[in-house]
Amino acid sequence: MTLEKALRYVCLAGIFILPFIVLYVSKSLFFPFITGKNFAFRIIVEIISGAWLALALVNSAYRPKRTWLLYAFAAFVAIMFVADISGVYPHKSIWSNYERMDGWITLIHLLAYFIVAQSLLNTEKLWKQWWHTSLSVSGLVGIYALFQLMGFITINQGGIRLDATFGNSTYLGVYMLFHVFIAALYLSRAWVEEPNKRFQYASLYGALIALDTFVLFFTSTRGAILGLLGGAALSACILIALAPRSRVAWRAGSVIAACIVLAGAFWMVRNEAWVQRIEPLHRLASIADEGVPGARRMNWGMAWQGFQERPLLGWGQENYAAVFDKYYNPEMYGQEPWFDRVHDIIFDWLIAGGILGLVAYLSLFLFSFAAIWRRGVFPSYERALLTGLLAGYFFYLIFTFDNITSYLVFIALLAYLAFHAYKDARSVPLGNVSQQSLPYISAAVTVLVWGSAWYVNANAIAQNHAIIQGISPQQGGVMKNLAYLNTAVAYNSVGNQEAREQFSQAAISIADAQGVTDDQKKQFINDSVAAMHVQEKDAPYYARFPFFLGILFDHVGAYDQANTALQMAHKLSPGKQAILFEMGLNALARNQADEALGYFKQAYDSAPEFDDGRAYYTAALIRAGKEADADTMLQTLMAANKATDARIASAYAARGRYDKIITIWKAHLQKTPSDVEARFVLAGAYYSAGDKADAIQALEDAKKESPASAAQADQLIEQVKNGGK
């Protein structure tokens, strides 16, 4: 019995420690805001799962109830396993990477967490203690965020959007969304059940609701803000529908009225200057004026094409990047070049698991709503709040995706609903093992947990540390960096992609480094190339890796090998301009001007409004001697004051057409006379054209425009007078 109690305490301790992982930031790990929390979550879940298994085998009281939520969750995890191993990059689908720490390995841990929480938190008192623990942690997070807002603590992601210990304002926003509703739930419960302490509870819970809502607002996470408002309005509507003539209905009606008034007032002032200065209001105003951001809509379109190609089981988790490459929309040129999420939960699961995976995922919400509305389970006000919470959370997910901090509270909510809705359900049968066997079972489980934890986490953590060592300065010199990076690659774990990419980036830096021998550079480059070739084979549908390999080859002068790699990248992502630009530069390096012109024209034609594409194409026309076509392009660029591009100037300089450079920069200065740097460029063009007098005059004009530049200008004037010496 003592051993049984000890195992139970291990389970409960682990469950109650989990809410605190949101405070954990491991600065010694790559992606410190993500990896530390996830490794902590996995290790804790592995420990409590082992302790639970020993308990459940000998005592039916610790076995989970047969609930629709359990069946749905298990089916979802099983379907995704099939989808992942049959996808286009199974290793990443199972293990994910350090940036996301998602994948099937996280799903199976979440299922274990759900089972243990449902089985061990088997009284309302324990659940109240757990939720209040989580609410307390949210208060600590909120206070930390307030210190960020006041400037006492740095905002980790930069800018002014609060991120606390999450490193991402979006993750913080949804975390606060959950806790606002949970605090409101317990406030309502205390208001009804303990009328003598109403104002005491109102002060406590009200302060927490105000704090979490305030922090949520200053994360500027639009999906979470609108999810909170929409969820609150839905909760109020439900209360009115359930009790239309009660005091509660009047209060709910006032909430709806307040939401309508606030929305109307905001609409009227959305273009005011003070609104634009407040980041959360500015971001909300952008939705009011522009609707869904273009990047979201374009990603939805690409995801739809990917789903149609593999509709049943999708591409496997973590593989939207392959879809993004294949169906890349050239209009995405202004966005980040390598999306790995659709930023829409529907499409993300359609890509990850096809229609089967999506239906299995949505069943979690379906059976959650069924549990909430099961007769006699929750009073009307709790039904309303829980429904509003799930609806607000789902609305948030339409514009983004989950992470471990949102999973933590969502899965706890599922377990809480299963506990309440299926108290009388039968337990899952696990056979009958005698109580006397518990010591032996515990010993076996200890070995199992140790082995599982080591297999899941040891190499992943070691690889993470090796990457950091490999990209950090070493007293042993670059060969020590090489040894660490080779070690990181050899672990063949979660961080394979990061290790190999960091290896290639390091090789580019080493190739230019001073004090490194040619043999050392050669070995570094050869090893990094070998690592990237393995990455190409592991992920044959990804354009990212042959593209990076092509850049590496180009950088070290292996132009033919670079061309081969870039051709493969282009085949995998024919619409991506960045690849076409690199192919054009590679062709120029191989003295294939006409070939380069073709690549640059293709990139330009795909999105003529893209400034980089226009500049590259114009420069290629100049280099190819197609003066008339180049002049046509320049007219448009000069009209928009965008012709002062280094690529265009370099192309004209290569052909000795300094007169063109002079014309472009003089026109620019007429529109922007305060651009002192442009006057220096103009002076250089005059000098290269042999016009010393105008070169000196341009430098004198720079001195007049900016007295701070006088010393530099005078030095250059002397050089001009002395013939450039």
Image (tube, rainbow, N blue to C red):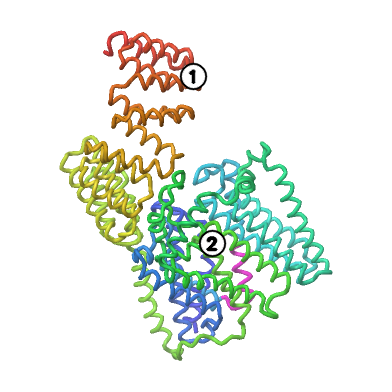
Answer few, some or many: residues within 10 Å of disc 2's Cα (few below 14, many 20 plus, some between 14 and 19). Answer: many
Magenta stretch: helix, strand or loop mostly = helix
Q: Quadrant of residue 373?
A: bottom right
Identify the magenta region. Answer: 121-134
Query: Residue 115 placed where, x, y %?
Result: 51, 76
Q: Which mark is residue 406?
A: 2
* Residue shown at the point (33%, 28%) measured from the top left: 627
Q: As displayed, is residue 375 above or below residue 620?
A: below
* Kind of residue at disc 1: Gln
Quarter of the figure that contains the C terminus: top left
Q: Quadrant of residue 379?
A: bottom right
Identify the residue at the far front of this view. 628
* Kind of residue at disc 2: Ser
Residue 524 appears anywhere in the view: no
Q: As displayed, is residue 93 above or below residue 159?
A: below
Q: Report the residue marked by disc 1.
A: 670
* Residue shown at the point (57%, 51%) measured from the top left: 292
Query: Residue 477 placed where, x, y %?
Result: 24, 42
Q: Quadrant of residue 582?
A: top left
